[in-house]
Image (cartoon, rainbow, N blue to C red):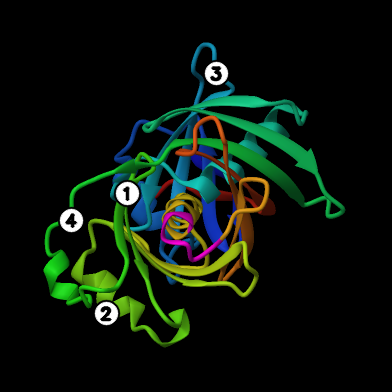
Amino acid sequence: MTTLTLTKHHGLGNDFLVLFDPPDVNHALLATQLCNRNTGLGADGLLLGHDAEGYAAKMTLYNADGSRAEMSGNGIRCFAQAVSARRGDLGPQLILTDAGDRVVVLASTDDERTISAQVEMGEVGVIDEPQGWASLACHPDRPVAHLTMGNPHSVVGVDEVAVVDLADLGGKVPHVNLEIVEPGPESNAITMRVHERGAGITFACGTGACASAYAAAQWGLATPINGEVLVHMDGGSATVRFSPENPTLAVLTGPATHIATIQVPLQ
């Protein structure tokens, strides 16, 4: 019987399983089996690691429902932590993803299980309104932005994120990551909740933090300090920095925490 050795990590509560050199099986099905919180190990996604010439590794992401995703800001921090443990160092990493090359710079923290990771997330781009958007019935005066970080996002400014039925709204546009944001509490900050494509409501979303920080700065909901916007999410906070030379280029900084190393038989 084949035994898989995986590590489990989380980035602000957004949890992932990491598997290097995966077997030649249906990876979408494997993701649904392993990520199931009742019958599997439980996670928001499965990250597969492959050797790639010129890179620390190649990362492939499957959501908990088996769908493929181009990129994850929390996921790549977790993946980089797993690569770091495999290599035995905290050196910078160039990681190949479906959204392109990403550079990750790691640093230790006071918690030996947790590293801090800074990720060059690429440029924020504008995309078309997703199919079915009208079903959300947003008030025409409410700020809305449809953006890409290599994966699709729809960001909506609201008065209070806690009172929004995010599960209902996210279910109407399941093919896009839906973020709702309110200003503050600090002048350079926003508070965000997210319904992720392929996973549902999660504690945090790194690409969503980047898209939301960009939109909020454009709308005047947050005033960056030294180019940085602080993004508060259900699982904790991350920072997004935009370069004055290229104000659409996002750099995400946040933690990744190793939870466990697990061996499971291949079903």
Residue 55 image label: 3
Q: Percent from the top left, x then y, of residue 67?
A: 28, 49
Label 2 packing within 10 angstroms: few (<14), some (14-19), many (20+): few
Q: Of helix, strand and loop, which one carries label 3?
A: loop
Q: Amino acid at mark 4?
A: Pro
> Disc 3 or 4, which lies upstream in sequence?
3
> Disc 1 or 3, which lies upstream in sequence?
3
Instruction: Based on the picture, tell me whether residue 220 belongs to the magenta stretch.
Output: yes
Residue 130 image label: 4
Q: Percent from the top left, x then y, of residue 178?
A: 33, 63
Q: Amino acid at mark 1?
A: Leu
> Disc 4 or 1, which lies upstream in sequence?
4
Q: Are marks 2 and 3 in contact (CB under 8 Å)?
A: no
Residue at 29%, 40% (x, y): give it: 26
Q: Are marks 1 and 3 in contact (CB under 8 Å)?
A: no
For discs 1 and 3, the disc positioned in front in the rendered view = 1
Q: Is residue 6 visible?
A: no
Q: Which residues are magenta?
A: 217-222
C-alpha span from label 1 to label 3 = 28 Å
Q: Which residue is mark 2?
A: 168
Q: Of helix, strand and loop, which one carries label 1?
A: strand
> Disc 2 or 3, which lies upstream in sequence?
3
C-alpha span from label 2 to label 4 = 16 Å
Q: Amino acid at mark 3?
A: Tyr
Q: Which residue is mark 1?
A: 147
Q: Are marks 1 and 2 in contact (CB under 8 Å)?
A: no
